[in-house]
Amino acid sequence: MNKIEHIGIAVKDLKASNELFAALFGEEHYKTETVESEGVITSFFESGPNKIELLQATNEHSAIAKFIAKKGEGIHHIAFAVNDIELEIERLTNEGFTMIHQSPKKGADDKLIAFLHPKSTNGVLIELCQDINR
Ligand code: ZN
């Protein structure tokens, strides 16, 4: 696994949170993207070398809606960049980690993604991210 690619934050109101984080970073978000399969609308901020993804649910069945209902708004996941996501899924599975996704899916921001189950990672939801155009 490489560096932290981004940190995902679950929010109730993306518009309000976009304004909040723009004020925090002194810079507007650079991208908004809906990931229909995940039931989320996302926006991305850059602050120096760091990237923050805000996620708002688009329907009540979305994992983000369930997360907010259970825990409230806040840090939802930490994403790590990987060179070869299929190899990494295989390695982690062999190490005994539980994957939510056994094979990569198309995520936001031109990435292939897969999540590990937080049960196997001390309650932290971890996302693997590989650039699609690498
Ligand atoms: Zn993410």
Image (cartoon, rainbow, N blue to C red):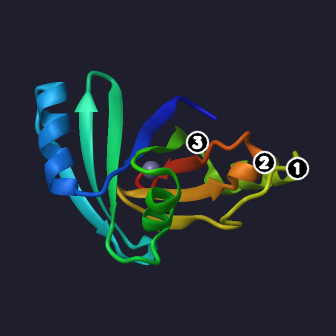
Q: Which residue is mark 2?
A: 120
Instruction: Tell me the crowding category of disc 3: few under 14, some 14 to 19, or many 20 or more residues within 10 angstroms, Cα based.
Output: many
Percent coordinates x, y for residue 132 in the rendering: 44, 56
Looking at the rendered structure, the kind of residue marked 3 is Val
- Which mark sits nearer the N-terminus, 2 or 1? 1
Answer left or right for 134 relative to 43. right
Answer left or right for 94 relative to 56. right
How far apart marks 2 and 3 lie (CA) works out to 19 Å
How far apart marks 2 and 1 lie (CA) works out to 8 Å
x 52%, y 40%: residue: 78
Percent coordinates x, y for residue 92 in the rendering: 79, 48
Q: Are marks 2 and 1 in contact (CB under 8 Å)?
A: yes
Q: Is residue 87 visible?
A: no
Residue nearest the observer in this picture, 132 or 37:
37
Percent coordinates x, y for residue 75 in the rendering: 45, 41
Answer left or right for 88 relative to 7. right
Looking at the rendered structure, the kind of residue marked 2 is Ser
Looking at the rendered structure, the kind of residue marked 1 is Gly
Q: Which residue is mark 3?
A: 82
Vertical side of 104 occupied by 109: above or below: above
Which corner quadrant of the image does residue 38 belong to? bottom left
The dot on residue 96 is 1
Report helix, strand or loop for mark 3: loop
Instruction: Tell me the crowding category of disc 1: few under 14, some 14 to 19, or many 20 or more residues within 10 angstroms, Cα based.
Output: few
